[in-house]
Amino acid sequence: MKRVQRAAAGMPATPKGNPPSLVREAAARYAELHPLYAAFCRHVRQALAEEIAARAIKIHSIEARAKSVESFERKIRRLLGAQRAPRHASEPLKRVTDTAGVRVITYFPRTVADVDSVICSRFRVLEKDNKTESRDAPGTFGYRSVHYLVELTPENLDRPDCRWFQDLVAEIQVRTILQHAWAEIEHDIQYKSARALPPAIRRRLAAVAGLLEIADREFQAIRDEHDRSRERPPADKPGRAPAVKRRTARRP
């Protein structure tokens, strides 16, 4: 992702040298900025919650967190192992785009589109990565979610309580509760594995993802049918015809 946080752009350059020292410097710099990212997360979460409630969109939950310093350090160590060594300590801060993370979890797939409308109306969207569409190819199953990189709009940045968030970028993820369950379990298994997962396990995880995709569609269909049934007038209950009251003749 090319768009990055520029909060650490003013850091002095460090000569090329020992990557571990760059990791320590970047982690120390992020530790200083961590309270700012935590406040930014809370603001983004609150803005989403208010707009979702105003539109009467029913969701499961909204999570928000600023990446811990320890997690940040582990991630930049992985980045240094996979990419060229940075020339100064601000580069890892630019490379990690999920320092401020917010996640919206919905009950049904169609609600994801409703939340998309909220995000586009309340924030300036820098990037959108629909990982659900990338899994729609035949025979492809796995992680499904929609990711956004956003920053506050100029109107919001004019507010006194938001001016400190200038140039900060948050990552927002939106997915259903079943997609979330799969992602959390897969991440836990992958994270605890020191090696790449064997093909047999990856295949079983993909199979579970396919089953949950079917379940998501069924839950959406059930919800749609339920909504339609509430709009229809109630039908007469099946059973015996109502009894006809007989008139008896009076005796003379």
Image (tube, rainbow, N blue to C red):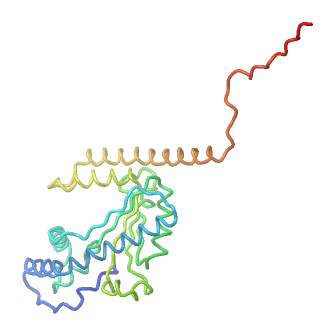
Residue 126, x across and y down, in percent: 41, 78
Which of 125 and 201 lies nearest the eye of the viewer? 125
Left or right of 45: which side holds 138?
Answer: right
Question: Which quadrant holds residue 18?
Answer: bottom left
Which of 205 and 4 lies nearest the eye of the viewer? 4
Above or below residue 202? Residue 18 is: below
Seen at 37% across and 65% down, the residue is 173
Q: Residue furthest front?
A: 252
Question: Which quadrant holds residue 184?
Answer: bottom left
Seen at 44% across and 44% down, the residue is 215
Left or right of 184: which side holds 79?
Answer: left
Q: How many marks?
A: 0
Q: Residue furthest top?
A: 252
Seen at 26% across and 48% down, the residue is 199
Q: Residue furthest right?
A: 252
Which of 45 and 10 lies nearest the eye of the viewer? 45
Left or right of 10: which side holds 180?
Answer: right
Above or below residue 234? Residue 12 is: below
Left or right of 135: which side holds 85?
Answer: left
Residue 34, x across and y down, in percent: 20, 76
Quadrant of image for the C terminus: top right
Seen at 16% across and 81% down, the residue is 32
Residue 28, x across and y down, in percent: 12, 80
Residue 5, x across and y down, in percent: 29, 82
Quadrant of image for the N terminus: bottom left
Question: Which quadrant holds residue 194?
Answer: bottom left
Above or below residue 8? Residue 40 is: above
